[in-house]
Image (cartoon, helix red, strand yellow):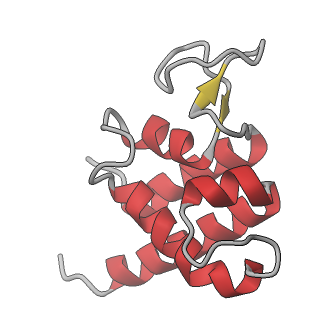
């Protein structure tokens, strides 16, 4: 059975918030860049965490968690507009420029949006 999107987002949030890195999808204990699926990977950016949880995917291309994170980042942009110079943002920008607190807010918004979608679908 496949995990619901909201549950995948919750699992990815743990990786991205509690084990965050910037400007790389994943790094090992020494801070060296590694593949997100490597057993050595121990720190993840928001997108790297999404890939790690959702399974193999081409990062950034039609990925169900990344698209939801990017949408959540865009929805929250008014909260951060004074801190970043962009009028459009992605999960990567939030992760790399605003840090863990903003990453947690972005995941929470994406989870809430996914739960709404899941609640509106009939089995």
Residue at 53% over, 39% down: 48
Q: Nearer the viewer, residue 13 or 80?
A: 80
Residue at 42% over, 73% down: 114
Does residue 40 appear to the left or right of 2 in the view shown?
Answer: right
- Residue lying farthest left? 123
Q: Is residue 48 above or below residue 75?
A: above
Does residue 68 appear to the left or right of 39 in the view shown?
Answer: left
Does residue 58 appear to the left or right of 51 in the view shown?
Answer: left
Residue 99 percent location from the top left of the image: 79, 55
Q: Nearer the viewer, residue 82 or 20?
A: 82
Q: Quadrant of residue 104?
A: bottom right
Residue at 67% over, 60% down: 94
**Count of numbered badges drawn on the protein:** 0
Residue 30 percent location from the top left of the image: 78, 12
Residue 93 percent location from the top left of the image: 63, 57
- Residue lying farthest front? 85
Does residue 11 appear to the left or right of 29 in the view shown?
Answer: left
Residue at 68% over, 53% down: 95
The C terminus, quarter of image? bottom left
Q: Is residue 12 above or below residue 88?
A: above
Residue 58 percent location from the top left of the image: 31, 37
Q: Is residue 97 above or below residue 24?
A: below
């Amino acid at each position: 059975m496949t995990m619901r999107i909201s549950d995948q987002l919750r699992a990815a949030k743990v990786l991205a918030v509690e084990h965050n890195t910037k400007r790389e999808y994943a790094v090992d204990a020494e801070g060296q860049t590694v593949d997100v699926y490597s057993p050595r990977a121990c720190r993840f950016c928001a997108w790297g965490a999404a890939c790690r949880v959702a399974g193999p995917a081409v990062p950034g291309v039609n990925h169900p968690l990344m698209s939801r994170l990017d949408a959540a980042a865009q929805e929250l942009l008014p909260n951060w507009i004074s801190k970043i110079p962009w009028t459009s943002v992605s999960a990567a920008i939030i992760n790399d420029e605003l840090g863990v607190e903003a990453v947690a807010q972005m995941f929470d918004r994406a989870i809430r949006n996914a739960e709404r979608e899941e609640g509106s679908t009939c089995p």
